[in-house]
Every structure is written in structure tokens, then in C-alpha cells.
Amino acid sequence: MGQTHAATPGAEKTGTRAEMREETERVILDAAERVFAESGFGGATMQAIADASGLPKANLHYYFASKERLYRRVVERIFTIWLEAADSFETSASPEVALRQYITRKMDLSRRHRFGSKVWANEVMHGAPIIQDYLETTLREWTETRIAVIRRWSEAGQIRPVDPRWLLYLIWATTQHYADFAHQIETLNSGPLSDRQWAEATDTVCGIILRGIGLDDGGTA
Amino acid sequence: MGQTHAATPGAEKTGTRAEMREETERVILDAAERVFAESGFGGATMQAIADASGLPKANLHYYFASKERLYRRVVERIFTIWLEAADSFETSASPEVALRQYITRKMDLSRRHRFGSKVWANEVMHGAPIIQDYLETTLREWTETRIAVIRRWSEAGQIRPVDPRWLLYLIWATTQHYADFAHQIETLNSGPLSDRQWAEATDTVCGIILRGIGLDDGGTA
DNA sequence: GTCTATAGATTGATAGAC
DNA sequence: GTCTATCAATCTATAGAC
């Protein structure tokens, strides 16, 4: 139901119907991610998301059944990106390489996906009403494999003895802080961080953490 | 206007009118802090706050002119508590003592004021629409004095050279994470952190950070 | 000061023309 | 598939009895 004329006037993009649908959904999801990040789920309005995506409000409901379903898709998309970065935590590499790569990747993520990070933070802060199942399955499994790896490093004497959980939380907290608290950081910095400042911050974070668990950081700082 | 009989039936608390008003305001502020933390500003409703404080909705508007004014008072109260903890960062003490005390105090704060921390995080994440002036004045001044202290430690060779800002952000992020992401931590932990776990986490955080900037942490880990 | 009832504005969602 | 108009529910805020 709903098949009409194949060529709509003013269609800037060519492609199959499926591709056009995907493109429109992406536009809406991008706008929604931004609005949810800036206002939270309760504070965001479908009207604001419609304005941000340049579409009439009713179209949002054509592509996403409800505000909650749209929000769920935004959160799921972020979790996927988060997981891809998580995989940069190589379980086969040395502690130095694995941790430095993971921290660097997460800092990059905070810079490139500020809104997504904020949506995730909001969701978790409010008790994860939508993605609790992900926390209990995917996140828990990922975390447990990494805990095992870090524990092995500890027992092999490659790093100082440390509870892997507190170390992981420190890494998550610090890297995500640069996205979630970007406004505070930029206020204190009187403007956005420069390329150079991002590099310095990343290097300093790596340096403190690596040295903090007994590794020679090998960096410039 | 509004002075009526001095003794209301069922009043469990004795005290002057001013004291009773203060007590009622505190009850409302506590409830509001919790509801704002759990639902965000936009998601919170005056009805939910009224239920949480055991008062009719109209009474909230008697004590606080609007939802926004109530929210502002909640945020201001949190900022005051945050500042008190901030003062535990002794500018005259040694790096080890000053930092260990400050981190410990902030971890305590995360444990005892989870809701307040979340409200603060929410406010900053959404661009600090209410407390932007505090960021630009009080927070900036506090931060600059501490940056100066840390820089002096660096230059005196007491700690490794490090940009004080990235160090402060790491401390803020890590300690506040235990409040803001408590739900995620408790999910992975299959329950709230025990006294022992809080102590261990605090000690590990202190250890990694102190060692990370070149200090012998002197702790158990 | 406290509470019930309600006004006035906003919002999520849908109907229906095109 | 797109868009305008609108309904039904919800929420902030207030009026007014007690």
C-alpha cells in the first residue's frame, strides 16, 4: 500500500525507493540525535525534531511509529558505534598498544559523536529504561572479556595489580567526559578545543593512565 | 497576607513559621532533585515532584513560583555542595595530600549525592541554560587557582609535567562517573557497590592518578 | 498555609486531501 | 509518500474555598 508515481517533482536524490527511505530515515535520525542530546527525551518535541530535519511533523510519524520508537533507534545506533570503537581494544596486543589504541579511539569518538555520547549518557543516567537489555547482555559480555584480559596482564606482572573494573570505568568516564561535558570544557577554554588541544588531551590521558598502572607510557608527555 | 492560626492540626514539627517554611522547602527540594535526576527537566512533572514530596501539586507553586525556579534552586543547591568539596583541594598541602583528599572527597560526594550529581550533569550536557553564569564566574575562578597550583607543582618538579586542565577533567570525570553512571555500574556489578568496593574504587582511582603524574601513591594498591 | 478544581497552552499522534 | 488541519491527552499554573 502506498505505491504512487515513481518520480516525485523536486527529488534531488536518485535511487531505489528503499535507498530513498533509508536516506530520509538517516536525516531524521541525525536530527533526532541532536535534539535528544540537547533537550533529553522528555524535553525534546517532535516539532523540534521535524524543524531540525526540515520535514513536516507528520512525516516523522510516517517513518517512525512513535517518539519512543524514534528515540530507541537513535540509542541503538549509538550503541553500535560504541561497540565498533570497543573492538579497537585488541585482546591480543600488549597492554600499552591495546590501551593506548582504545583510549585514542574513544577520544576520537567523543569528538566526532558528541550528540550520540550525550544521548547515551542521558539514557543511562535515567536508569536505561530503553536499553537495559543491552547493558545486561552485549555490554556485560564485552566487559567481562576485557576484565579477563586485564586481569591476565596483572597476573603476568605486565601491569601493576589493579581491579579491571575501576580501570575501565576511569577510561570510559574520562573519554566520554570530553563529549558529555563539552559545554563546560569549552566555557573554561573560552572556545572549542583546537586540533592541537585534542591531541594533547588524548596524549595526557593516555600518559596518566598507562603510567598509573605501571607502564612506561612511551608518549611525549 | 496569609497569616492564619499558629497551630495547625497534625503538625508534627514545632518551630517558627520561618523554620517550618524552610523545612517544607527542603522536603520539596529533595523530592525535586530526585525527580529531575531521574527524568531530566523536560521529563519531570510537577505532579511527580508533588507525589514524591507528599504534597498537593498546588503547594509546590506556593513555595516556588514556577517549575523553572524550583529547578534553579535545585541546581544552585548542588553547586554549593560541589564547591564545599572543591575547597578540600588544599592549595597549601603537598600534591599527594591535596589530590588524594580531593579525589576521596569527590568519590564520597558521588556516593552520597547521586541525584544532585545527575542534575548537574544534565544541566551541563544541555548547555547549562540555567547556570551558565556560575560556570563563567565561580567555576572559572576556582579552576584557575587550582590550575596555578598544579602548574607550580609541575615547575617545581614535584609532579611530572602535565597540563593541569586535562588532569582536573580526568578527576572530575572519573569521580562523577560513579554517580552519573551508577545504574550502569550497578548493572555490571549485579547490585550496588559495597562499602568495601567503594573503598577499593577510591583507592584505585587515587593510585592510578597519583602514580600517573609521577607520585608514589603510598596506598595499598 | 493547604487543597480541589480548572483554565490555558503544549504536545504526541492521526485523519484525510493531494 | 507528503503535507495541512485537528483531536485527545497532558502539563504548568492559578483561582478560590477552607
Image (cartoon, coloured by chain):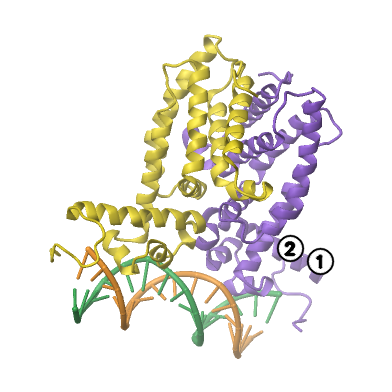
Chain colours: A yellow, B purple, C green, D orange
Depicted B76 relative to depicted B60: above or below: above
Secondary element under disc 2, as helix, strand or loop, is: helix
The residue tagged 2 is B23
**Outermost residue toward the right?**
B92
| Badge 1: residue crowd in 10 Å (few <14, some 14–19, many ≥20) | few
Q: Position of residue B142 (x, y in %)?
A: 77, 46
Cα distance between the residues tagged 1 and 2: 10 Å
Disc 1 marks a residue whose amino acid type is Gly
The residue tagged 1 is B15
Q: Residue at x 79, y 77 (%)?
A: B6
Quadrant of the rendering where the C terminus of chain A is positioned: top right
Disc 1 to disc 2: CB gap under 8 Å: yes
- The answer to which of B135 and A142 lies nearer the viewer is B135
The chain holding disc 1 is B
The chain holding disc 2 is B
Residue B93 is left or right of residue C4, and the answer is: right
